[in-house]
Amino acid sequence: MTESILFATDSYMRNLRENTAREFDYTRALDSGDWKRWQQSFRERLAELTGLASLKEHTRDLPLSSRTTETVRFPGYHREKTYITTELGVEIPFYLLIPENSTGPFPLVLTPHGHGKRGKETYVGNYSSDSERQQAEAGERDVALQAVSEGYAVIAMDVRGFWEMSREEEFSTKKAGSCDELQKRAFMYGRTLIGERVHDMGRLIDYASAHPDIDTSRIVITGNSGGGTVSFFTAALDERISVCVPSSCFCTYLGSVMKVPHCHCNFIPGIMKLGDMHDISGLIAPRPLLFVHGILDQDFPIEHTREAFAHARNIYEAIDCKLTDRCELYEGNGGHRYYKERVWPFIRQHLTSSAGFNIQGGDRFLQSP
């Protein structure tokens, strides 16, 4: 009988870990304290690796060509549906929610959604059935409605790969999304879905910056699961984000996407040669950053999230030990879902003073007046 020999995954992974040094391991910046240079170099390399840099270059002079197709009024706010061009031949659809009980311009909250087939519809409470409503409200996924009720302008978009931004081939067969197929095509041209989704968020900010009811000096981004990943990377790569609240996504790579089966949209070829997720959190510092996570999350195990968070806090403390309250981990007593309890108090606490946060002199904050 022939002996069966299977692939030695443990040895393979051990070899990769031991022979790969992260170029932007944050501990290397501890000695020099030159966080500004570390961030600048890391951000540039990450933009290149994700394909964001080339995508931004190709669309630099591309008009947004916005078109609004409907306006609906609800108690306390109105909702507009609009499309803008995000790259040649590709439009991104979104809802803009504007409060009506006060006068703008209002701070902006971007709410990228996770891996739900109906995308933005869930976040704005546009449910297709009572069961969908019950599931969404149980997981507190009506994030856009939460934000507008807090008095913020909200942009709730379809993330690339879902609902109106899914491919016909998947949509017609009732598949949840098109992540895998879009990611494979992006990889072949040196791009990634993460980079493309961050680019889409940037185009939405460009649109918002010309809107009279929106104050883009104060921008929050928050979403759950895949939407948390989009939130995290957008804040890391786009310094216009003032406050970042990613939910159900922050972990170590070894403890999550390389340990538990995950959608292909989480992967960036070569990322471990640059940095792990806690290193990337240093690109958000010193801006306020709240990680929201369930203690029973099986996709991103809490012990590895706590490990990554400890490193993130080290970065904030190394930049300025007085301001570690800007980096928090809130643990919800459940699984892979959104937990709003700490989100909006954290945003209220930090948003008014977040504009103008910067690193000066290599190792200190410049606090807003």
Image (spheres, grey):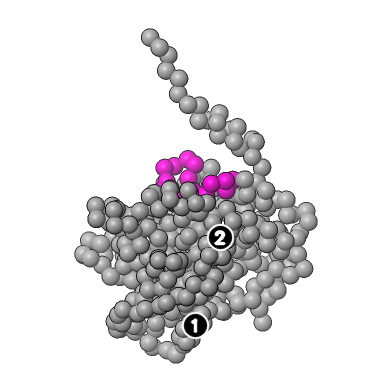
Work out how far the residue at label 1 is from the one at label 2, CA to CA, in angstroms: 24 Å
Please tell me which residue is depicted at 40% across the width and 62% down the height of the picture. Answer: 159
Residue at the spot of label 2: 54
Q: Quadrant of residue 314?
A: bottom right
In reply to whether residue 30 is colored magenta, the answer given is no
Please tell me which residue is depicted at 55% across the width and 34% down the height of the picture. Answer: 13
Q: Is residue 144 visible?
A: no
- Foreground: disc 1 or disc 2: 2
In reply to whether residue 266 is colored magenta, the answer given is yes
Q: Nearer the viewer, residue 94 or 67?
A: 67
Q: Which residues are magenta?
A: 257-272
Q: Secondary structure at mark 2?
A: helix
> Is residue 320 shown above or below 368?
above
Residue 295 location, x and y as percent? 45, 51
Q: Nearer the viewer, residue 241 or 346?
A: 241
Residue at the spot of label 1: 210
Q: Residue furthest top?
A: 1
Q: Secondary structure at mark 1?
A: loop
Residue 30 as seen in the image, left or right of residue 13: right
Question: Which amino acid type is marked by label 2?
Answer: Ser
- Predominant secondary structure, magenta span: loop
Please tell me which residue is depicted at 35% across the width and 62% down the height of the picture. Answer: 165
Quarter of the picture holding the C terminus: bottom right
Q: Quadrant of residue 281?
A: bottom right
Count of numbered circles in the view: 2
> Is residue 38 shown above or below 66?
above
Residue 92 location, x and y as percent? 39, 68
Quarter of the picture holding the N terminus: top left
Q: Earlier in the sequence, mark 1 or mark 2?
A: 2
Question: Which amino acid type is marked by label 1?
Answer: Ala
> Is residue 270 shown above or below 197?
above
